[in-house]
Image (cartoon, rainbow, N blue to C red):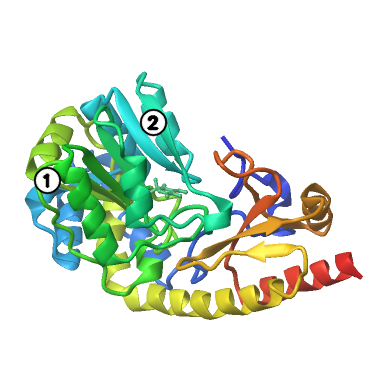
Amino acid sequence: MNKHGCYMGDNIKEIIDFSYNINICGIKDGLDKYLLSKISSITRYPEIDGLSAKNAICDFYGIDKKNCIMGNGAVELLYLFARVVNFKKVLIINPTFTEYERAFKILGTEIIWGNLKYEDNFELNICKFKELIYSDEIEGVIICNPNNPTGKYIDEENLVKMQTIANNKGMYFILDESFIEFAMDEVPKRKFEGEKWFVLRSLTKYYAVPGLRVGYAIGSETIIKKLLKHKEPWSLNTFAIEAIPFLLENREFYKKGNNQIIKNREYLLSKLRKLTNWHCFDSETNFILCKINENADKVIEYLFKNKIVVRTCDDFKGLDQSFIRLAIKDLDSINILLEVLKNYYI
Ligand SMILES: Cc1ncc(COP(=O)(O)O)c(C=O)c1O
């Protein structure tokens, strides 16, 4: 596992960490007091399945409760799903989030890799999708949208087409929308055709709460019932359950953070694109992927010496050490990064 995002130990305060991709809004005023006011509840078990949190999520996002399951982050639900479906073969379209491979591989599932190319800007279109799902032996395909680490976003029309194609082939369509709220204000309610679909969502990124561990998934009634049968009890802790209504009620605050991210992203891209040896990809989310077409290790080391950490990407299948991922941070941090890079290239 790539050690990024808060692995900097005691030096954390001095470091500007571009490696972890969380909304820049920080903690909403009042969340600390609100959670502290719930402290007496930790002497009791939380709800076994986080029912009140699920009700809040379903009401807010317009999801039918029969189609929803709560988890200790989206990652818990990914691993649970992999265990329950127990595929022989799954298609993972790379470069993408590394946990998909791990979740399926530990169960003995064979990974079929669908490789998107640098020359094609790592874009996935319908034609490419059809080409990748050629084999009838593939039982499921995973798509991350917007994709980590490329930042690429597949629009709704094409996404629905892909699901229909997968459905017609009898394949599971697994969609990870953990970053969807950075790409659009009104997230889709999600109800796909057929039984074989599953959508992961996370509150970690948009609501800036990686430490709380809150995620949910939407799926057909059949798969949700199966998952509930296999899921461990109490995986949502008391504070996670209590925080959800607070986070949702304050969505405007998180939206403001994202509006700033969009502005900062375009600013950072416009500046980085002036560097001759850098290729920076368009992104619809809160990070950008860059390829450094020179000695990237040296650049990364120089940044680190100047207390700037970036997400190296050589652990992403299909990328190598010349790629880095930069989270979109506040303007001051971005300007420090740009200044350090300017000094490097002088
Ligand atoms: C694409 C993607 N999905 C899911 C997750 C994990 O989300 P959670 O914190 O809700 O488990 C990550 C974390 O980096 C991610 O990049």
Tag 2: residue type? Ala
Residue lying at 32% horizontally and 38% vertically, measured from the top left:
78
Residue lying at 53% horizontally and 50% vertically, measured from the top left:
117
Q: Is the shortest distance between ligand 1 and the CB of mark 2 under 8 Å?
A: no
N-terminal of the pair, mark 1 or mark 2, is 2
In the image, 330: left or right of 63? right
Residue beneath label 2, please?
103
What element does badge 1 sit on?
Answer: loop
Residue beneath label 1, please?
220
Q: Is residue 194 above or below residue 79?
A: below
Specify the quadrant that holds the N terminus. Answer: top right
Residue 96 visible in the current orientation: yes
In the image, 120: left or right of 48? right
Q: Residues within 10 Å of mark 1 (few under 14, many from 20)?
A: some
Residue most extreme to the right:
346
Residue lying at 59% horizontally and 69% vertically, measured from the top left:
329
In the image, 23: left or right of 321? left
Q: Residue 176 at x, y = what percent?
A: 33, 50
Label 1 to label 2, Cα distance in Å?
21 Å
Q: Are marks 1 and 2 in contact (CB under 8 Å)?
A: no
